[in-house]
Amino acid sequence: MKIPSPCISVCKFKNAGYCVGCGMTKKQKKKFKRLEGRKKKLRFIEALRIQQQEVGLKANWERAYRRRCRKKGVDCPLDRAEAPASSELPPPPPVPAPAQ
């Protein structure tokens, strides 16, 4: 599965060199395009999310990025990053016995 670029097509670098839409710098946008491999792209997106929190863009960007992934028909990498591994999940509650 191809991971979509974090760019959400706003591309206005008014916030100290950071895009007001995705929070990337021009240099970071070029870097993402050159990244090869799914793991590298996922790590880039995770680092970008931390950067966005510092810049104050995370909530709006996540909504727009999820919409972009849906339009492209791909699973959103944010869902994978947020979901705990199955080994980290608590065991399911016991199923109650039927009443007699």
Image: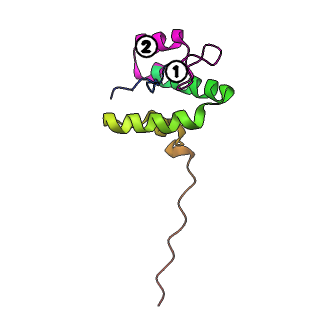
- Which of the pair 51/17 is nearer the observer? 17
Residue 18 at what x, y percent from top left? Answer: 59, 17
Residue occupied by mark 1:
44
The residue that appears at 43% across and 13% down in the rendered structure is 35
Residue 10 at what x, y percent from top left? Answer: 47, 24
As measured in the structure, the alpha-carbon distance from the residue carrying label 1 to the one carrying label 2 is 9 Å
Residue 40 at what x, y percent from top left? Answer: 47, 19
Q: Amino acid at mark 2?
A: Leu
Please provide the residue range marked out in magenta: 12-40
Q: Quadrant of residue 47?
A: top right
Q: Is residue 18 above or below residue 74?
A: above
Q: Amino acid at mark 1?
A: Phe
Helix, strand or loop for disc 2? loop
Determine whether, in the image, residue 12 is placed left or right of residue 16: left
Mark closest to the chain's N terminus, 1 or 2: 2
Helix, strand or loop for disc 1? helix
Q: Quadrant of the N terminus?
A: top left
Report the disc number at residue 35: 2
- Which of the pair 40/17 is nearer the observer? 17
Q: In this figure, which colouring scheme has been used for the structure? A: rainbow
Magenta stretch holds residue 23: yes
